[in-house]
């Protein structure tokens, strides 16, 4: 089973709202990732968690705040977003190392008004 | 500098045709990993293949085949007898060391494949 789930599927929020994206995997993977994908572009890495510790932050603005409460869960907290942050947010996980195959969830399509 | 180049932005074929998607990569690492992912209109990225830099064997999986050539830094993907369900964006990706023990996956810009009935 290579399933990564993400909720919600769609999210519309105002620039003053606070919301969270959730990602879950039950494959025993120890590395988890957040990517941002704009229309007709490839995914761009935002954050990497390895063994529940943040290992890579790709200079992402502080209005995006990741959290890894345990080895199965990854959250992305959103606050004071801009309309240009509207995108598909993809979560992925891999077995242990960041060289292992990443398996992606279906994504959350975010619209910021 | 672009690390992964997918020169074909869009390809359109008729069902049952064979089609090859090109991928050229650039890296200074001796150890690296190459991937292909499929992204249908639903949005989910579906893993197709992973290849490490020490394994130059070509691979076939059903109608899919991959040709890895280190001499030309290419990792091309061929779909034989294409079907409408193959319509998607295909991404080639390179995983290379980004510092310490961390590796980062860098995607090409993707090739939109449309298979017409």
Image (cartoon, rainbow, N blue to C red):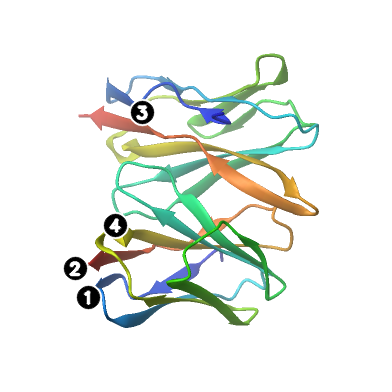
What chain does badge 3 belong to?
B
**In-front residue for pair A77/B57:** A77
Alpha-carbon span between mark 2 and mark 4: 9 Å
Residue A20, compared with residue B7, is above or below; it is: below
Res B21 seen here: yes
Q: Is residue B5 left or right of residue A94?
A: left
Q: Residue at x 60, y 46 (%)?
A: B105
Mark 1 closeness class: few <14, some 14–19, many ≥20 residues within 10 Å: some
**Which quadrant of the figure has residue A72?**
bottom right
Secondary structure beneath disc 3? Answer: loop
Earlier sequence position, callout 1 versus callout 4 = 1
- Mark 2 touching mark 4, by CB under 8 A? no
Q: Is residue B109 left or right of residue B11?
A: right
Give the residue pinned by disc 4. Answer: A84
Give the residue pinned by disc 3. Answer: B82
Quarter of the picture holding the N terminus of chain A: bottom right
Alpha-carbon span between mark 2 and mark 3: 40 Å
**In-front residue for pair A44/A95:** A44
What chain does badge 4 belong to?
A
Residue B22, compared with residue A111, is above or below; it is: above
**Residue B107 point in image, percent of width and height:** 52, 40
On residue A14, the disc is 1
Secondary structure beneath disc 1? Answer: loop
**In-front residue for pair B66/B97:** B97
Same chain, marks 1 and 4?
A: yes
**Residue B97 point in image, percent of width and height:** 73, 44
């Amino acid at each position: 089973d290579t399933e990564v789930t993400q909720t919600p599927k769609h999210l519309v929020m105002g620039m003053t709202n606070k919301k969270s994206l959730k990602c879950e995997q039950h494959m025993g993977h120890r590395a988890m990732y957040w990517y941002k994908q704009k229309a007709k572009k490839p995914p761009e890495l935002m954050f990497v968690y390895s063994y529940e510790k943040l290992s890579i932050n790709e200079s992402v603005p502080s209005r995006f705040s990741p959290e890894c409460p345990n080895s199965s869960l990854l959250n992305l907290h959103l606050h004071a977003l801009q309309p240009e942050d509207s995108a598909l947010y993809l979560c992925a996980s891999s077995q242990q190392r960041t060289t292992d195959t990443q398996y992606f969830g279906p994504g959350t399509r975010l619209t910021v008004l | 500098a672009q690390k992964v180049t997918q020169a074909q932005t869009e390809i359109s074929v008729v069902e049952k045709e064979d089609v090859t998607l090109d991928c050229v990569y650039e890296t200074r690492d001796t150890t690296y990993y190459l991937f292909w992912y499929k992204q249908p209109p639903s949005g989910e990225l579906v893993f197709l293949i992973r290849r490490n830099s020490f394994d130059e064997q070509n691979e076939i999986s059903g109608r899919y085949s991959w040709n890895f050539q280190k001499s030309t830094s290419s990792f091309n993907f061929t779909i034989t007898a294409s079907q409408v369900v193959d319509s998607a964006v295909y991404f080639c990706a390179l995983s290379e060391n980004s510092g310490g023990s961390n590796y980062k996956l860098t995607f090409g810009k993707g090739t939109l494949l449309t298979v017409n009935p």
